[in-house]
Image: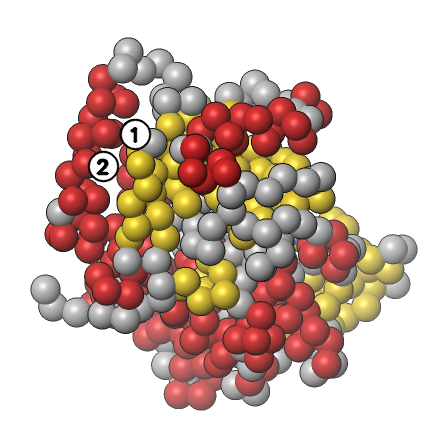
């Protein structure tokens, strides 16, 4: 027997994009059902970046989940970049007329959104199998899935594909209707999480002859560090000691002196990729977040881009239901992509500036040093980094220049 359910918006994926969309729609009186492939615990086990731009902070507040973020999140008015063994500060606040970022892990954001959804009694089907999207080229799309031995059919007005890079929504679009742009980088990031005080109270991005390193954090007592590693490296071959030793080799003596090491809570290797799908709307199905685009993590734009897609999408759906206008739906893809390409450009550029490239004869490293020397000693150069790092305003592409 198949259980028939009816909702206005079927959301595929309960990552930050799907959960935030569900929350914004709920607050506007629009009902949505979320269908997620894995369990809630599994979703919470994924460790990802956690630097929130002001637009993301505002959106989480708007969604009613800002309370713990404001209590526990760490406000950062700057960050540091190191090259040639010297540290330079990018003063975000001074360079962007007072803008800041908030360090608050994606896991915490997801946790807050999950709690809010549970408290409001909104339906989420976790551990759904065989999820399929149908008829999104008509006004009556459907989603079918199984949970245990039960079968479900979800009739809806719209499908929101918030199902990440490996999701089913993008894969269900006919190949002729979609164009994909992709760049895979010749290295990965080995990340280590530890309950040790961060080496510095701000983030430190390091360009060293041995490769990129990042000193990040989750709280005053929890650190997150990354090392650029060859794609052929396997995480099981990296002991904690080897990690700390390599990190030390990429830092200057003064920073090393303040580094507190300890056992890892988590270690993993992530590949780096730039990826964009055009368009992001297919009839009555929309893609949002990692389902439509991936950025390399240098610059921490992934979660912020997912949040702004969801902002545009929730606005478009609210306009549809409340004002019977399809204007927002029609412009969704173009508006998102204009913003996405700017963040893709920044993430690609920042990655290229800070990493060592395996095939380099040495000239790329010299170009990087010259560029860093220019950027960090030029007001215009530093302002450009700061403006992109805190995030371009939501209406950036719409303002006349
Ligand atoms: N059916 C249902 N759910 C699915 C399916 C499927 N076929 N395939 C994937 N999913 C789920 C995944 O299990 C995951 O929980 O969709 C969710 C997608 O979540 P994320 O990958 O976290 O993507 P998104 O919500 O867009 O968040 C973007 O994640 O990778 C980071 O840098 C990125 O921070 C950004 C954020
Ligand atoms: C992280 O803390 O995981 C992090 C921070 C900044 C980045 C990337 C990752 O640019």
Residue 209: x and y in percent read: 37, 22
Say which of 218 and 42 sits in front. 218
Looking at the image, which residue is at 76% across and 70% down? Answer: 4
**Number of numbered discs overlaid on the protein picture:** 2
Residues under numbered marks 1 and 2 in contact, where contact means CB atoms less than 8 Å apart = yes
Query: Left or right: 346 with respect to 21?
Result: left
Which color scheme does this rendered protein use?
A: secondary structure
Q: Secondary structure at mark 2?
A: helix
The answer to which image quadrant residue 13 occupies is bottom right
Q: Is residue 276 visible?
A: no
Looking at the image, which residue is at 28% across and 58% down? Answer: 91
Say which of 183 and 104 sits in front. 104
Compared with 364, 262 (above or below) is below
Compared with 257, 56 (above or below) is below
Query: Left or right: 119 with respect to 219?
Result: right
The quarter of the rendered structure image containing the N terminus is bottom right
The quarter of the rendered structure image containing the C terminus is bottom left
**Which residue is situated farthest in the top direction here?**
361
Q: Secondary structure at mark 1?
A: loop
- Pointer 2: what residue? 372
Say which of 15 and 331 sits in front. 15
Say which of 262 and 239 sits in front. 262
Does label 1 or label 2 sit earlier along the sequence? 1
Residue 287: x and y in percent read: 48, 56
Q: Is residue 112 visible?
A: yes
Report the mark closest to the observer, 1 or 2. Answer: 1
- Pointer 1: what residue? 84
Looking at the image, which residue is at 51% across and 21% down? Answer: 230
Residue 336: x and y in percent read: 35, 60
């Amino acid at each position: 027997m198949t259980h028939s359910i009816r909702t206005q918006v079927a959301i595929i994926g309960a990552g930050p994009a799907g959960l935030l969309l569900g929350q914004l729609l709920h607050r506007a009186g629009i009902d949505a059902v979320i269908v997620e492939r894995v369990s809630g615990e599994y979703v919470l086990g994924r460790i990802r970046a956690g630097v929130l731009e002001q637009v993301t902070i505002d959106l989480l507040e708007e969604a009613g989940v800002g309370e713990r973020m404001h209590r526990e999140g760490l406000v950062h008015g700057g960050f540091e970049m190191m090259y040639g063994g010297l540290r330079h500060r990018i003063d975000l606040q001074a360079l962007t007329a007072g803008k800041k970022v908030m360090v608050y892990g994606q896991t915490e954001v997801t946790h807050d959104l999950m709690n809010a959804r549970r408290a409001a009694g909104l339906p989420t089907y976790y551990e759904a199998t065989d999820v399929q999207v149908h008829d999104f080229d008509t006004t009556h799309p459907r989603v079918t899935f199984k949970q245990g031995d039960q079968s479900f059919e979800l009739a809806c007005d719209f499908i929101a594909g918030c199902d990440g890079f490996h999701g089913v929504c993008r894969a269900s679009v006919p190949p002729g209707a979609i164009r994909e742009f992709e760049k895979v980088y010749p290295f990965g990031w080995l990340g280590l999480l530890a309950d040790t005080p961060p080496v510095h109270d701000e983030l430190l991005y390091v360009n060293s002859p041995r490769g990129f390193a990042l000193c990040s954090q989750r709280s005053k007592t929890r650190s997150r560090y990354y090392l650029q590693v060859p794609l052929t490296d396997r995480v099981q071959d990296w002991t904690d000691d080897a990690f700390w030793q390599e990190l030390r080799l990429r830092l200057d003596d003064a920073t090393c002196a303040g580094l507190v090491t300890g056992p890892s809570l988590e270690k993993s290797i992530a590949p780096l990729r730039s990826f964009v799908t055009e368009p992001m709307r297919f009839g009555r199905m929309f893609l949002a977040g990692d389902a439509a685009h991936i950025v390399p993590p240098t610059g921490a734009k992934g979660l912020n881009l997912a949040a702004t897609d969801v902002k545009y999408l929730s606005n478009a759906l609210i306009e549809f239901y409340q004002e019977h206008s399809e204007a927002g739906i029609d412009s969704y893809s173009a508006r998102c992509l204009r913003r996405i390409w700017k963040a893709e450009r920044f993430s690609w550029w920042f990655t290229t500036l800070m990493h060592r490239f395996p095939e380099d004869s040495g000239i790329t490293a010299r170009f990087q040093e010259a560029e860093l020397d220019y950027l960090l000693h030029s007001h215009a150069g530093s302002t450009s980094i700061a403006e992109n790092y805190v995030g371009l305003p939501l209406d950036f592409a719409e303002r006349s220049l």
